[in-house]
Amino acid sequence: MNAHDLYVVSPYLAMAGAAALVIILDLFLPVSGRGGRGRGLLPYAAFLLLAGPFVLSLIQFYDLGDAANLVRGGDAGSDGAEASILLGSLSVDRFALFFNFLVTGAAALVVLASTEYVRLMPRFQGEYFGLLLFSATGMMLLAAATELITIYVALELTTLPLAALGAFLLNGRSSEAGIKFLIIGAISSALMLYGMALVFGFTGSTQLSDISSAVARAGGGGAFGNYALLVGLVLLVAGFGFKISAAPFQMWVPDVYEGAPTPVVAFLSVASKAAGFAVLLRVMFTGFFDVSLDWAVLMAALAAASMTIGNVVAIAQSNIRRLFGYSTIAHAGYLLVGVAAGVGTAQSGPETPVFASIGPDSVLFYLGAYTAANLTAFFAIAAIGQRVGGDRISDYAGLVTRSPGLAIILALALIALIGVPPTGIFIAKLYVFTAAVDSGLAWLAIVGVVNSAVSAYYYVRIIRVMFLGQPPAIYQDGGARSARSAAPWAAMGLAAAALVFMGVAPGFVMGAAGAAVRALGV
Amino acid sequence: MAWVLFIALAVVTLGGGLAVVATRNVVHAALALLVSLVAVAGVYLLVYAEFLALVQVLIYGGAIVIVLVFAIMLTRSAEYPRTSDNRQWPLAAVAALGLLAVLVPAFLINAVQDTEAKNAAFTGIAQSLFTTWAVPFEIASLVLLVALIGAIIIARSGPGEN
């Protein structure tokens, strides 16, 4: 460990430090009066502390230059210095930094949006933000991890705080959400660990680069010659499938989305999914690319199943959170289309896989756009829920007469989730489906387009209820109406602005995504 | 000799595992689990992984089984029938046997990569823990912190309690 190593891991240290500081700060802020005015500063403290990991990531981004990886002693950027102890475990490259920005941004918006929500909690406000930031630390580490054991512990650091946050409200539904997330997360971790054990047993290493060379040696001829490795890979994908909420590993999603606190669901649905896709992309493309012709079929099948199951079941939902639970399963499907499209077929013959960078590119861009859209939607749902006092779609009837601003913002997010221009997801879907056609997966692109049309039905239904429905004569009192601040509106506005920005000027995020995918070094 | 010991340990491990599933009393199941886990520690000794064997006995044999027994004791089990039987067991049996059928051929078809590092000494483990494995080791400490905080929140927030 030397000074340079400390510098390399500084964004992660800053994020974990911010989490610990918020918890400690909670002890010293005065509990003045009812509702705790002093504690009202906590979210802003957490927001400001997030500047630490953001600025450090920015410095590293410019410091990176032409080097592939900030960790010294690797193949690139080596200047005779002794190999770092981080070597093999972490790779701080443009791919990791892309997710640093995505996760830090999502965390900042969720913190802002939580200001109104945490007032409902009598205690443990510091722990709420602390756990959120610890989870964000795990997500950032997950995107940088290049070794199976590091991936595993980072994944646990990501999911454990989310399970506690899911149960935070301690009512029946919230506890159910927490325990379901914990138990199903544990089962998926067990599957994944078994897969890792098999991969280690049959390649002799836990480092992705060594696994890659072992796979290249073993899997000659393109066919998956190694049955044990195939089983290991399938178990790994099953474990990751839970985290990205892809079918058929999706059964926990609707219950957790219904019961957990809304800002936590917002964070879970975007940042946790992004981190899951980060690790999936890194493991598949860096570790197992030589057998990619075999797993691309698996990814395509998961994609088709997720899109279809998510969209078809969403139609029947009457609770908006459950509906978004199924919607997020469908979006995991669209994203998996991009993962499958990363494997192209060569002109020379179908036996040799070719890396089609447009596939992972489109996944990263889609994650950015989806993060903006889903955060907008969930922030609006949280605010509407506090005003109308319910999560059923029928509660939203005639919302436009009562809260026109919220109705319009939610409508924008819903239109975006269908994939209508001028929003980011339109470009993202175009990008993903183009990638699929380019890689010879035209059938998958068709399934995706048909599914997008199906999804329009249930998204538009909510808009219709909000704008054309009859408002109830007497509103239920949603409570907490007295304590309103500008912060949730700021979070909503920023997320919506990012959404539209990615639609009208996609070049910036596309460029970043392209640079990130090149860092995978396939 | 090693084979004889291995077969004996394997029989005890599997027997313990079967007893966990077959017995109808939850406490008996927890104790059968202990037998199975300690036998696994024996398997570790057989491949010269004495550190792992020690950890296995301490953590699994000690901590986990004791926590299990405490959990059974403290969750008012008198109000519930103390059996671990339910109607889904045929489904579970099919799933378990299916997984077995998928996994066993993996070890029959392919040869396990023989990594060296037999008889890893305690000092070697300690050294590699703070050099090669420093990153996952440090992340694990964060995971423990998070687990503690989460447990405190859930355990100490009963209604009406301060």
Image (cartoon, coloured by chain):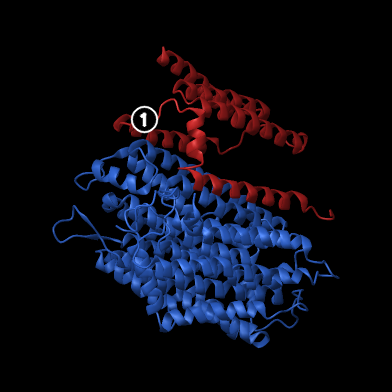
Question: Element under label 1?
Answer: loop
Q: Looking at the picture, which amino acid does disc 1 mark?
A: Glu
Q: Is residue A220 left or right of residue A481?
A: left
Q: Residue at x 75, y 67 (%)?
A: A120
Depth order, front residue of A115/A508 = A508
| Placement of A398 over or under A147, stated as above or below | below
Q: Is residue B17 left or right of residue A421?
A: right
Depth order, front residue of A349/A457 = A349
| Placement of B20 over or under A205, stated as above or below | above
Residue furthest toward the top? Answer: B1
Badge 1: few (under 14), some or many (20 or more) residues near its Cα, within 10 Å? few
Q: What is the letter of the red chain?
A: B
Depth order, front residue of A273/B98 = A273
Residue A370 visible: yes
Residue A317 visible: no
Q: Is residue A455 left or right of residue A287?
A: right
Figure quadrant of the C terminus of chain A: bottom left
Residue furthest toward the front? Answer: A80
Q: Could you say where residue B148 lies in the image, as x and y percent from the top left?
A: 67, 48
Q: Residue at x 38, y 39 (%)?
A: A200
| Placement of A472 over or under A302, stated as above or below | below
Q: Chain of mark 1?
A: B
Q: Residue at x 47, y 35 (%)?
A: B96
Residue furthest toward the left? Answer: A348
Q: Quadrant of residue A333?
A: bottom left
What is the tally of numbered marks visible in this picture?
A: 1
Q: Could you say where residue A450 lies in the image, as x and y percent from the top left?
A: 37, 71
Residue wearing tag 1: B116
Q: What is the letter of the blue chain?
A: A
Q: Could you say where residue A368 lies in the image, as x and y percent from the top left?
A: 45, 71
